Amino acid sequence: MTKGEITRSNILRSALNLIYKKGYQATSIDDILQITQVTKGAFYYHFRNKQEMGMALISETINEQILPFILNSLSKSTDFKKNMYDTMHGLLLDHSFMTAENGCPNVNLIQEMAPLSEAFRKALLVSLNKWSKAIENEIIRCQLAGQLSSDHEAKKIALNILTQYHGVRNMGKILGKKYYYTFLKEFKTYINSLN
């Protein structure tokens, strides 16, 4: 990586940490500059404004944190139900970055910014579609392997799973990590009910 690429990556990673804890609107460019130790000139060399940085945050940094985790979890075994459960379990309990009290950065941005900004809504939709497609592909793979009836619509199941994930992440902010265990028990029942 060049020095410029390292600076840009540092800005995005620092912004992610701040925005994850404080929210996008409550995090200023000055807040980001303070923890990155870069100048305003360096920030504006890489991003025209805070919104452009936010778009890069979604498309690059958040996806780098979460999408590979999902893809790796979904391909751990040939057992669809185990993969689905382990992916959800891993996102909630094993992911090195995300915490119960702060939820999920992608979910947080959907709640905070999608209603306010069409640019954010579109960028978040692209991210969400990548997650959904990864789950959908795993469902199709297991249908082809005879583990799940082809009567199921892969896209609907994928969206249902993502909706459950978004909901549990929000509830976890209030009810704490212990709630994840209750949810995971019910999620396992749901996954096992798919025939």
Image (cartoon, rainbow, N blue to C red):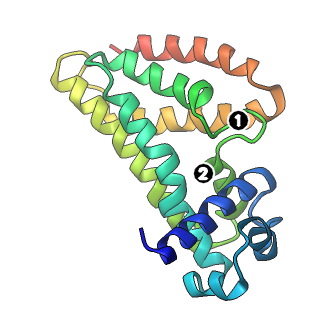
Q: Is residue 182 left or right of residue 151?
A: right
Camera-side residue of 93 and 182: 93
Camera-side residue of 11 and 67: 11
Camera-side residue of 11 and 145: 11
User: In the rendered structure, which amino acid carries the disc numbered 1?
Assistant: Thr
Q: Is residue 68 left or right of residue 142?
A: right
Q: At which x and y percent is residue 9?
A: 54, 65
Camera-side residue of 40 and 53: 40
Q: Secondary structure at mark 2?
A: helix
Q: Any mark on residue 99, and which?
A: 1
User: In the rendered structure, which amino acid carries the disc numbered 2?
Assistant: Asn
Of pointers 2 and 1, the one earlier in the residue sequence? 1
Q: Residues within 10 Å of mark 1 (few under 14, many from 20)?
A: many
Residue named by callout 2: 106
Q: Image height check: is 128 above or below 39?
A: above
Cβ–Cβ under 8 Å for marks 2 and 1: no
Quadrant of residue 89 in the image? top right
Q: Residue at x 64, y 19 (%)?
A: 183
Q: How many marks?
A: 2
Q: At which x and y percent is residue 99?
A: 70, 35
For marks 2 and 1, give the one nearer the viewer: 1
> Visible in this render: residue 58?
yes
Q: Residue at x 32, y 34 (%)?
A: 154
